Amino acid sequence: MLEGLRLSYGVSTRLARIAPDRALQYKEWSIPAGTPVGMTSVFMHHNESIFPDSYSFIPERWLDPERRKHLEKYLVAFTKGSRQCIGMNLARAEMLITMAKVFRSINFKLFETTREDVTLAHELFLPFPKKDSKGVRVLVTS
């Protein structure tokens, strides 16, 4: 589930934060008070120094408890801090229960779907694949 969240982005636009009353220091740069600063989940989730081979689906990267603890600091699918999604824990629980039920009960096979059908091509606050993509299509095999 965590690897799926990492690659699904949610909101793909920059979510600005402002320190209204103090300057922020980032390495050698000083950012004046009141300056909007933002980062996208797309950039965070594809930082190769944190998530090597970041465009590949590798759920095994989350198996080691120590490594998982480190990686979860950089998983921002629900954002972080004071503007973090209030329903994050409920959403995670629902995803786990739903995935367990669906993938134990039904077998799927991809139908006329390629990686391009899910690769971020443009964004309008939300991420979108190429314009002629039909999305992910599957056949139920049992």
Image (tube, rainbow, N blue to C red):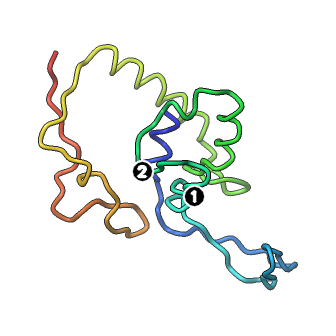
Q: Is 90 left or right of 53, judged from the image as shown?
A: right
Residue found 65% across the figure and 52% down from its top: 84
User: CA–CA distance between discs 2 and 1?
Assistant: 12 Å
Rendering coords of residue 61 (x, y %) = 55, 35
- Per the image, label 2 sits on a secondary structure element best described as loop
Instruction: Classify mark 1: residues with Cα within 10 Å, few (<14), some (14-19) or many (20+).
Output: some
Q: Amino acid at mark 2?
A: Tyr
Q: Quadrant of residue 25?
A: bottom right
Q: Residue at x 25, y 18 (%)?
A: 106
- Dot 2 or dot 1: first in sequence order is 1
Compared to residue 124, the image places residue 88 above or below, namely above
- Left or right: residue 105 versus residue 134 is right
For mark 2, does the 10 Å Cα neighbourhood hold few (<14), some (14 to 19), or many (20 or more) residues? some
Residue 11 on image: x %, y %: 48, 59
The residue identified by callout 2 is 55
Write down the residue under mark 1. 44
Which amino acid lies under the numbered mark 1 shown in the image of this protein? Met
